[in-house]
Amino acid sequence: MERISYDLNKLTGRERHGLLLSVVGPRPIAWASTVDAQGRVNLSPYSFFNAFSTSPPIVIFSSGRRAREAGIKNTHENVLEVPEVAISVVSHEVVQQMSLTSNEYDRGINEFEKAGLTMMKSKRITPPGVAESPVVMECAVTQVIPLGREGGAGNLIISEVLLVHVDQRVLAGKSSVDTTKLDLIGRMGGNWYTRAFGDALFEIPKPGSELSIGVDSLPKAIRESDILSGNDLGKLGSLKSLPSQEEKSAIRQREGVKEVLQAVKLTDAERACQVEKLAKEWISKRLEQEALALLMSFHG
Ligand SMILES: Cc1cc2nc3c(=O)[nH]c(=O)nc-3n(C[C@H](O)[C@H](O)[C@H](O)COP(=O)(O)O)c2cc1C
C-alpha cells in the first residue's frame, strides 16, 4: 500500500476541510433546533456530532465559525442566549428537507417553515423538535467551548439530554430502538451521504467478558494465508479457545475433509489451498470453531 501523507498545516482551510470531512465518516447528523432571546426558532443540521457519555447523558455537536469573516452561526448565537437545543435525528425520509435547512438564512428566519416541517412542542425546553423525525432529544446546553478564532474553528456545544421522544414504530423493546427500522442517514465527504438501512446493516456479536484468543495465537501459516482475509482472521481470533485434539481428530474424519487430506494426487501446497478454501467457506457460514479445527488439523 503506497500512501501520500498530508501535513494539515500546509493545506488551505478549504483543502483541510475537504480532506478531514471525507475521511471522518459516516457522521451522524444532529438536526438542531434552538431559539434566540426573542423566542425566534432556528433549525440547522450539524454532522460534527456524537454521544460522548451516558451517565450523565451527554451529546456534543460543533458549530464552526464561517469561512467568511469568521462569524459565528445562528445556532451558536442562540445557545449563548438560550442554552437549550432540541436534537432530532435524520432519517432517509426527510433527508432533502434536512439539506434545505442548511441554507444560511438570516437570523430569525424559521427553517421549519422554509423546509415545510412541523414543529413538535417540547416538554422541558423552549425549542421545538422536528415532528417528522423518529427520535427527538430535548437537551440543556451545559457548556460551549470555542476551539479557535479563525474561519472553520469549531465551537463545541455540549448538552445534557433531558428527554428522548421515540416514535413507537421504531421501538424494539421497553427502552430500545430497532436499528433496522430507523433508516438513519450519515454524512460523508463532499456532497455524499450514506443510508443505514437494509443490506448496509450487519451485526458483529460483542466479544463479551471472556477474552478472545487473538490473531497472534493462530499458527503462522494461517496468519499468512493468501486465501483467508483480514476479516476471516478477525473472526478466528475472536474465538474463545483453540481447538482441542479431539475436535481436530473429529474434523479430519468429516466427509469432504477426509478426501482432501488423503488425496494422493495433491501437493502439500494444493492441499493447503483446498483446506483454506473450505475453512473460508465455513467461516462465511458462521462455523468459525470448526473452520479453525480444520485449519489447525492441517497447519498446526
Ligand atoms: C448534513 C450537514 C451537516 C453539517 N454539519 C455542520 C457542522 O457539523 N458544523 C457546522 O458548523 N456546519 C455544518 N453544516 C452547515 C450548517 O448547517 C450551515 O452552515 C447552516 O446554515 C448553519 O445554520 P445556522 O447559522 O442557522 O446555525 C452542515 C450542513 C449539512 C447539510
Image (cartoon, rainbow, N blue to C red):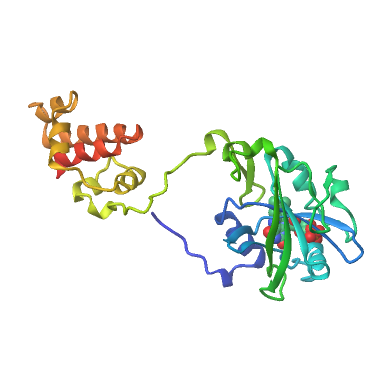
In percent of width and height, residue 283 lies at: 32, 36
Of the 4 image quadrants, the one containing the C terminus is: top left
Q: Return the x and y of residue 267 as percentages of the image width and height.
A: 11, 33
| Residue at the extreme left of the image, as rendered | 264
Task: State the residue at coordinates (25%, 55%).
Answer: 216
Quarter-wise, where is residue 179 in the image?
A: top right
Q: Is residue 288 visible?
A: yes
Where does the image place residue 172, in percent across and percent down from the top left? 59, 38
As drawn, is 223 to the left or to the right of 58? left
| The N terminus: image quadrant | bottom left
- Residue 224 visible in the snapshot: no
Residue found farthest to the front: 174
Q: Residue 190 or 272: which is nearer the viewer? A: 272
Residue drawn where x is 87% and y is 47% of the image: 114
Q: Is residue 151 above or below residue 179?
A: below
**Quadrant of the rendered image holding ligand 1:** bottom right
Q: How many marks can you see?
A: 0
24 left or right of 108 in image: left
Where is residue 49? Give x, y as percent: 64, 58
In depth, the one of 102 and 213 nearer the eye is: 213
Q: Residue at x 63, y 62 (%)?
A: 58
Q: Nearer the viewer, residue 289 or 92?
A: 289
